[in-house]
């Protein structure tokens, strides 16, 4: 198929690529050892340092890192060190804020500290975080920040605000991230960061859409009771949320580039399914199962339309798992007997076999097209 010269060139390229990876790994290991040593020296003498010495030293290190990031921003030969400086400034900004709070006894909360940290480092990651791992760290920090502030949200008065704040977080924040992830200006400035926003928005809304099926078990009335609102007022606010989410989704579809619409379609579909329990306020175990399977089927259809084999397999697996859960919900008491376990095992094998057959037929049709 290929000539001997071509084979030799390919082998040479792969060998040099492997050598570069080994050299890069050794550089990172050496740098980690140096930083760990510096951290241990500082930690062992921490109590001997005065407050002003700590603050000035920390601010000096952060300033040096910021200067090096600016100095090496266009230097391809310093790309590795540039990324290391971004990593360092990203993490040391948090420790500097913690040090300021400790030094001046500000008595702030962990959630407030993380929120301020996210506010300060977002611009850094958006502009200079072009290594794919840096945006992932930012997203992890963002999720942790939201989690640490949920307790604060629960205490907000009046009583209906916490619910609608959480609903905003699971709808409008992913829509905002999806819009940014599909924005041409952000793709041109920092494509890894834009891709990360799209991926995590889709992942987060998928989890929330699956979780929303649980609302059918207790019904929306329980939520309305906790918000202490009249049903008509609650429905009016939900209707407002739906209209705004639909308008934003239409704007995203209209103005986003059509190069790869898979993640965008998944996110918007998931948000639509989040609102289904509020549109159909029914207390029913059957509706919970229909919602779950319906959402999984919608995702499977999107996967087929966009040719994503792995995502299709995952969707079919979730449908199979939910069908088996229906059997457990209906005949759970049978598992206390030997025959029940046998029937349950055979049913699970049958569901998996049928799922594999469906997957094979669908993927075969996708490849034929």
Image (cartoon, helix red, strand yellow):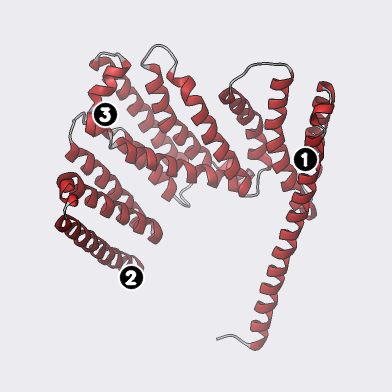
Q: Residue at image x 68%, y 83%?
A: 8
Q: Residue at x 42, y 41 (%)?
A: 253
Label 3 vs label 1, nearer the camera: 1
Local packing at callout 2 (Cα closer than 10 Å; few below 14, some 14-19, many 20+) is: few
Q: Quadrant of the C terminus?
A: bottom left
Query: Mark 3 or mark 2, which is nearer the start of the sequence?
Result: 3
Q: Which mark is residue 368?
A: 2
The image quarter containing residue 24 is bottom right
Badge 3 vs badge 1, beta-carbon distance below 8 Å: no
Q: Position of residue 71 (x, y in %)?
A: 82, 42
Is disc 1 placed on a helix, strand or loop?
helix
Q: Secondary structure at mark 3?
A: helix
Q: Residue 278 shows which numbered tag?
A: 3
Question: Toward the viewer: 292 or 1?
Answer: 292
Q: Are marks 2 and 3 in contact (CB under 8 Å)?
A: no
Q: Nearer the viewer, residue 361 or 115?
A: 115
Q: Residue furthest top?
A: 158
Give the number of the disc on residue 39. 1
Camera-near label (2 vs 3) is 3
Neighbours of disc 1 within 10 Å: few (<14), some (14-19), many (20+): few
Q: Nearer the viewer, mark 1 or mark 2?
A: 1
295, above or below 124, in the image? below
At 22% from the left edge and 60% from the top edge, which residue is drawn?
A: 345
Residue 176, percent from left and from top:
48, 34
- Residue 73 appearing in the image: no
């Amino acid at each position: 198929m290929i000539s001997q010269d071509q084979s030799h060139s390919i082998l040479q390229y792969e060998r040099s690529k492997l050598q570069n990876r080994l050299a890069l790994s050794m550089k990172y290991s050496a740098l980690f050892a140096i930083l760990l040593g510096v951290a241990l020296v500082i930690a062992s003498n921490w109590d001997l340092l005065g407050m002003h010495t700590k603050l000035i030293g920390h601010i000096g290190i952060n300033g040096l890192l910021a200067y090096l990031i600016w100095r090496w921003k266009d230097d391809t030969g310093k790309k590795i060190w540039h990324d290391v400086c971004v990593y360092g400034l990203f993490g040391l900004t948090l420790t500097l804020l913690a040090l300021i709070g400790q030094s001046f006894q500000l008595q702030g909360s962990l959630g407030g500290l993380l929120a301020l940290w996210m506010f300060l480092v977002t611009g850094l990651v958006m502009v200079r975080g072009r290594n794919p791992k840096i945006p992932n760290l930012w997203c992890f920090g963002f999720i942790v920040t939201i989690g640490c502030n949920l307790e604060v949200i629960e205490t907000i008065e009046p009583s209906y605000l916490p619910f609608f704040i959480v609903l905003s977080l699971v709808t409008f924040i992913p829509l905002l991230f999806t819009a940014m992830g599909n924005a041409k200006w952000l793709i041109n400035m920092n494509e890894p960061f834009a891709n990360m926003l799209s991926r995590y928005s889709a992942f987060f809304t998928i989890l929330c859409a699956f979780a929303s099926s649980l609302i059918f078990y207790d019904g929306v009335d329980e939520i309305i009771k906790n918000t202490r609102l009249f049903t008509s007022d609650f429905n009016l606010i939900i209707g407002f949320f739906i209209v705004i989410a639909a308008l934003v989704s239409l704007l995203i579809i209209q103005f986003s580039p059509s190069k790869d619409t898979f993640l965008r379609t998944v996110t918007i579909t998931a948000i639509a399914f989040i609102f289904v329990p509020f549109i159909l306020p029914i207390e029913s175990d059957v509706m919970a199962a229909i919602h779950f399977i319906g959402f999984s089927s919608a995702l499977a259809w999107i996967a087929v339309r966009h040719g994503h084999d792995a995502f299709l397999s995952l969707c079919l697996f979730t449908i199979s798992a939910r069908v088996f859960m229906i059997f457990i919900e209906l005949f759970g008491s049978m598992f206390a007997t030997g025959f029940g376990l046998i029937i349950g095992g055979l049913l699970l094998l049958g569901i998996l076999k049928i799922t594999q057959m469906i997957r094979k037929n669908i993927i075969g049709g996708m490849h034929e097209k």
